[in-house]
Amino acid sequence: MLKGRSAVITGGVRGIGFGIAVEFAKQGADLLLCYRSNDEAAEKAAKELAQYGTKVLTAKGDVCDEAFAESAVKQAAEEFGQVDILVNNAGITNDKLILRMSKDDFTKVIDTNLVGAFNFTKYAAVHMSRKKSGRIINLSSVSGVRGNAGQANYSASKAGIIGLTLSNAKELGRRNITVNAIAPGFIDTEMTMALSEKQREAALGQISMGRYGSVQDVAKLAAFLASDDASYITGQVIGVDGGIIM
Ligand code: NDP
């Protein structure tokens, strides 16, 4: 249970981030959900989460912007009294073969997926260190573990997330802060709906479980990692991939 805990979830108003928000709210956590531009999704998310009776705030901004990360974390700390859990979930893809990938295509994905996670970790870790307690959960990907054709930018960002996770786990362990990464395979969200039917079918053929993952599959693991039951688990990269990695 996460009763009395507070969480900041980047990209928390739809997709996997919203799935995690629902699971955390069901377990009693107060939430600050960050998003980039989708006001409609943010309003809908806040409305849906109200049924669980915890405090839910939304903050609009770009995770690439360090000042936004600082103010969002500060807002959560002021409103909830503490930031117990950070989920670095916001992410984008911009798939292209390397021969066609511009430097801008590359750096934009790195900035959002990796620098964004750095920005939020930096400010959340200050609050967690003071309290000598915290949970940081980073969204990596199967692509970050084994690479993927057409995703040099995305795979590099998600491999970078693993490095960030391991280094931060080593630095913050003595402050009783755990840092772990989740590496999902193919999860049914708007991100994967954007792929062609052919690409979706090819992915399905590689999944031993014979189905795409759901946001709940990822959310259940995030809630476990955020809980007291996971207090001795840190520096891990845990797959939620239905066997696609094998
Ligand atoms: P979605 O595209 O469904 O949602 C992404 C969320 O991130 C949105 O809420 C979006 O905000 C937010 N976001 C994107 N860029 C920024 C930014 N610059 N600043 C602030 N917020 C931003 O993605 P998924 O739910 O599918 O993915 C969530 C995470 O899981 C990502 O890190 C992704 O890489 C990872 N992942 C997903 C997999 C999958 O199969 N779906 C597989 C492996 C990893 P807004 O709503 O305003 O657009």
Image (tube, rainbow, N blue to C red):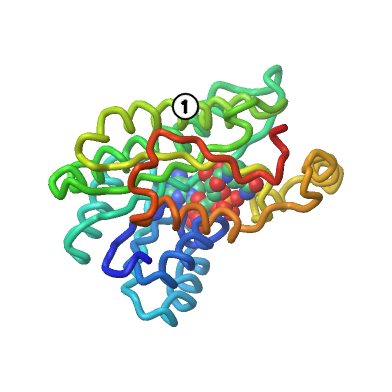
Q: Is residue 44 above or below residue 142?
A: below
Q: Residue at the far top: name it.
A: 99
Identify which amino acid the numbered label 1 is placed on. Answer: Gly
Q: Nearer the viewer, residue 130 or 46?
A: 130
Label 1 CA crowd tier, 10 Å (few <14, some 14–19, many 20+): some
Which secondary structure, mark 1?
A: helix
- Residue 126 drawn at (x, y percent): 18, 42
* Residue at point 77%, 43% (across, down): 207
Q: Which residue is pictured at 33% across the width and 55% down the height?
A: 228
At a point 51% along the width and 30% down the height, the residue shown is 157
> Is residue 229 visible in the rendered structure shown here?
yes
Which part of the image, by quadrant, shows the C terminus? top right
Q: Residue furthest left?
A: 130
Look at 36% across and 71% down and name the residue there: 28
Left or right of residue 65: residue 98: right
Is residue 107 shown above or below 83?
above
In this rendered view, identify the residue nearer to me: 21 or 45: 21
Residue 40 in picture, x, y percent from top left:
51, 69
- Estimate the x, y position of residue 17 in percent, counting from the top left: 50, 56
For the N terminus, the image quarter is bottom left
Residue 65 relative to residue 212: left or right: left
Q: Is residue 225 left or right of residue 130?
A: right
Q: Nearer the viewer, residue 169 or 150?
A: 169
Residue 92 in view: no
Q: Which residue is mark 1?
A: 160
Q: Is residue 33 above or below residue 242?
A: below
